[in-house]
Amino acid sequence: MDERGLLDMIIARLPGFSYPERILLCESFNRETDLIQSSAESIERIIARKLKEPWNPAGFCPVAERDAKMAKLRRIGWVSWASPAYPPLLREIYDPPPVLFFRGNLPDPEKRLVGIVGTRRPSPQAAAQAYDIARDLGRRGISVVSGLALGIDAMASWGNLEGGAPTFAVLGSGVDEVYPSANRPLAKRILDNGGGLLSEYPPGAGARKWTFPARNRLISALAWGVLVVEAPERSGALITARQSLDQGKDLWVASAGAEAAGYAARRKQALYDRRGTAKLAEDGAGIIGSAADILREWNWRIEEIENAALSTADSELRDVLPECGGGRALAADLARFLDIDL
C-alpha cells in the first residue's frame, strides 16, 4: 500500500458527500493523516458548501480498515481514483466511485466493451438474440459488460463466454455477495474465463433496491456502446440507456425488442413487455440485429463484419440448452432455462 494508506477507503465511507465531492477530496489529499487532521472549515472550502454532517473522519478509519481486511481475506482487489490501474473510462463520467472493488481482472483499457442489458423476463426470441450477439462479439475479441441479472444479462454473459472473450459484470452488492444466487455458477465461469466482477460496494455489502440503479451508470461508463435488448418502460435497462446517452456512448436497441412500437399497446397484458425498447427505437436509437451491425457501426474491416454474421440460435444454443430443437421446441427449452412462463 502506498503513502495514501486507507485514504480513499475512508473517503468512500464518509456520509453526506456526492460522488464529485468525494473525488475532490481524493484529489485534495495524498495521505489519510492529512484528511483526518483537516478541519471542517477546510473541507467546506474544498467542496464549496457547508457540511450537513458532523466532521469526524477518524471515526471511519475502523470501517475502512475492516473493508481492507475483508478484501484481503476474500481475495478481493481494489483500486482507488488515484491509482493508475483505475479504469480510464470511469474517470470520464460525472459521478465515478472513489474506490472500485473487483474479483478476477479489470477490463483491458485498450479493448472495447459492449454493455448488454434488458429485462429479467425476456421473450425467447430476445434471450436468444442476446446470446447470439454476445457470442459473436466474443469471437471477434469484444467483451460484454452487464449487471449479472437474470434474463438478458445472464444470456449475454453466457454467450460472450461461449465466444471466448473475458466477460465482465458490475454488481449491485459486494463482489463476494453475488446476487441473484442463481447466477453464482455464471459468476464463477466469468472468473475462470479471465473476466471480472466489479463493484463500488465494499466486501460483505448486500444488494439493496437503490444499489441497482446506481451500478447501471458503471455498466454504461465501462462500455463503448450499450445494447438494450428488450425492456419495459420502467426498468433498470432504460436507466442504463439514459446514462449511456448522458455519457456520450453509442446506444442501440436489439431488433427483437424494437418490433412493433404498438405491440404492447395493442395487447395491454402482453406477456413480454417491450414498450421501453420500442420507445427507444422510435426516438432514434439504432436497431441492431447482429454483432455484424455493431462492427459496421464502428467501421470495422469488411472481412471482420462478414465473419461476424450470425448463425442460427437453433444450432449454437445447444451448448447451453442440451437437446434443444428448433421453433417451438427451442422457445420451450429456452423458457425453462430462464424460468419464463409461455
Image (cartoon, rainbow, N blue to C red):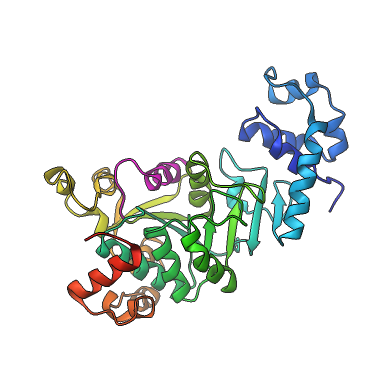
Q: Quick one: 7 or 24, which is closer to the camera? A: 7
Q: Looking at the image, is 10 positioned above or below residue 126?
A: above
The residues colored magenta run 230-246
Q: Is residue 227 left or right of residue 326?
A: right
| x, y percent for residue 204 | 65, 50
Q: Residue at x 40, y 75 (%)?
A: 304
Q: Quick one: 115 or 9, which is closer to the camera? A: 9
Main secondary-structure element of the magenta-colored stretch:
helix
| x, y percent for residue 153 | 42, 59
Q: Is residue 170 left or right of residue 296?
A: right
Residue 26 showing in the rendered view = yes
Residue 291 showing in the rendered view = no
Q: Quadrant of residue 98?
A: top right
Q: Residue at x 78, y 52 (%)?
A: 69
Q: Name the outermost residue toward the left.
A: 266
Q: Quadrant of residue 124?
A: bottom left
Residue 236 is inside the magenta segment? yes
Q: Is residue 138 left or right of residue 128?
A: right
| x, y percent for residue 282 | 23, 45
Is the C terminus in the top left, top right, bottom left or bottom right quadrant?
bottom left
